[in-house]
Image (cartoon, grey):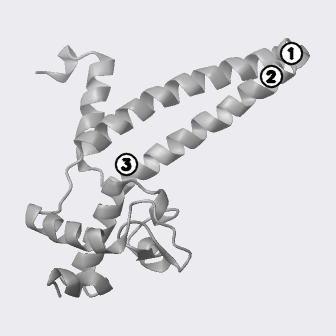
Amino acid sequence: MKPAALGAAALAALVLSAASSAASLSTLHLRQQRQAATIHRYRGTERFFRNHPRLARTRVGRRALRFARQEIARTRRELRRTLAALRRARYPEPSWWLGQAACIRSHEGTWTDNTGNGYYGSYQFLLSTWRSVGGRGYPYEASPTEQTFRAWLVWKRDGGSWREWGTAGACGLT
């Protein structure tokens, strides 16, 4: 299909889907967080003018409110595309590795573990380890998919070794 035959929206979607498939998982997660923060910021603008109706009726107030609503709508469209790209994202972990990771997980904890001992999430990441492989925030706040992806990165960084996890011996792994 020729680019000229595509409408502007279809062409933008095509470019976005190609870019999204090339984008790394962490980039997509960062984009999602940034878009959610943008929506939150402009919702605050709406809330301000709802609480101050006299200011909302001024020329500046109307303009600011209109801009905030446009930005919320635009960012929500972008967020929908980002979430769709996250659903389509392919994870590099092979199935045999996922089986080993499941054993580690079963001995480490639940996805939302914050045990108070400095280890977090289902793979009991140290915060420094989590951040060293590109994790943002705390591991227990991340999705199960994100935690598994970060564990894969640690495993690869360590040369295909489970040495970071003390429970690897219980699974027969090294």
- In the rendered structure, which amino acid carries the disc numbered 2? Phe
Q: Earlier in the sequence, mark 3 or mark 2?
A: 3
- Say which residue label 1 marks: 53
CA–CA distance between discs 1 and 2? 6 Å
- In the rendered structure, which amino acid carries the disc numbered 1? Pro
Badge 3 marks a residue whose secondary structure is helix
- Say which residue label 2 marks: 49
Relative to 158, 119 lies left or right: right
Badge 1 marks a residue whose secondary structure is helix
Residue located farthest toward the right when viewing the structure as drawn: 54
Question: Which of the labelled discs sits on residue 139, or is there none?
Answer: none
Residue 19 makes an appearance in the image:
no
Badge 2 marks a residue whose secondary structure is helix
For image coordinates 27% across by 15% down, the residue present is 7
Question: Which of the labelled discs sits on residue 28, or is there none?
Answer: 3
How many dots with numbers? 3
Q: Nearer the viewer, residue 70 or 133?
A: 133
For image coordinates 24% across by 77% down, the residue present is 155
CA–CA distance between discs 1 and 3? 38 Å
For image coordinates 31% across by 35% down, the residue present is 84
Could you say where residue 118 lies in the image, as x and y percent from the top left? 52, 79
Relative to 31, 106 lies left or right: left
Crowd band around label 2 with a 10 angstrom C-alpha radius: few (<14), some (14–19), many (20+) = some
Residue located farthest toward the top when viewing the structure as drawn: 57
Could you say where residue 42 lies in the image, as x and y percent from the top left? 66, 31
Q: Dots 1 and 2: beta carbons under 8 Å?
A: yes
CA–CA distance between discs 3 and 2? 32 Å
